Image: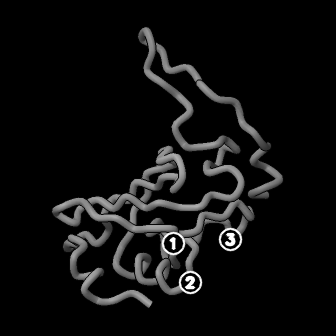
């Protein structure tokens, strides 16, 4: 269960969500940028899996794909406006079947893919 003091330290505003930098807990590798509101943070602490504020109802990573993301530690920046979310990632992190969501780069006026899918996304997501 999460203490309300933690939720109160996060700078949720009238728009609701704050950015969540989702990282592997053991390497600090950035997996994705997500959005979390008060309800998703509370649900994450209550259940363990990371819940994101993308749509209503909340989206729990892995609920359809089995590629789970479990909270290890939640951190806050000084203003409480950005949440580094350290996780244990099981399977791929991205909907494209890649290790993370950052697989393209701006290079020499182009945007090449830097990483191929590790798994085909169709079997994961139907």
Q: Cα distance, mark 3 to mark 1?
A: 10 Å
Q: Which residue is mark 3?
A: 63
Q: Are marks 2 and 1 in contact (CB under 8 Å)?
A: yes
Q: Which residue is mark 2?
A: 47
Q: Cα distance, mark 3 to mark 2?
A: 13 Å
Q: Which residue is mark 1?
A: 51
User: Furthest residue to the top?
Assistant: 108
Q: Are marks 3 and 2 in contact (CB under 8 Å)?
A: no
Q: Residue 77 lies in what quarter of the image?
A: bottom left
Query: In this rendering, would 69 be left or right of 86?
Result: right
Which numbered disc, 3 or 1, marks the residue that appears first in the sequence? 1
Q: Residue at x 22, y 82 (%)?
A: 8
Q: Nearer the viewer, mark 3 or mark 2?
A: 2
Looking at the rendered image, the quarter that the N terminus falls into is bottom left
Q: Residue at x 25, y 73 (%)?
A: 10
Query: In this rendering, would 41 be left or right of 90?
Result: left
Residue 116: which numbered mark, if any? none
């Amino acid at each position: 269960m999460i203490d309300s003091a933690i939720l109160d330290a996060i700078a949720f505003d009238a728009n609701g969500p704050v950015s969540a930098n989702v990282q592997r807990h053991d390497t600090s590798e950035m997996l994705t940028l997500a959005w979390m509101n008060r309800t998703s943070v509370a649900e994450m602490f209550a259940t363990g899996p990371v819940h994101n504020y993308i749509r209503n109802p909340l989206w729990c990573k892995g609920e359809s794909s089995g590629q789970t993301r479990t909270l290890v530690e939640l951190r806050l920046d000084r203003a409480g406006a950005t949440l580094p979310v350290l996780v244990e990632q099981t399977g791929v992190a991205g909907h494209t079947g890649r290790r993370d969501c950052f697989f393209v780069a701006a290079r020499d006026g182009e945007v090449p893919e830097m990483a191929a899918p590790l798994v085909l996304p169709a079997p994961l997501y139907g």
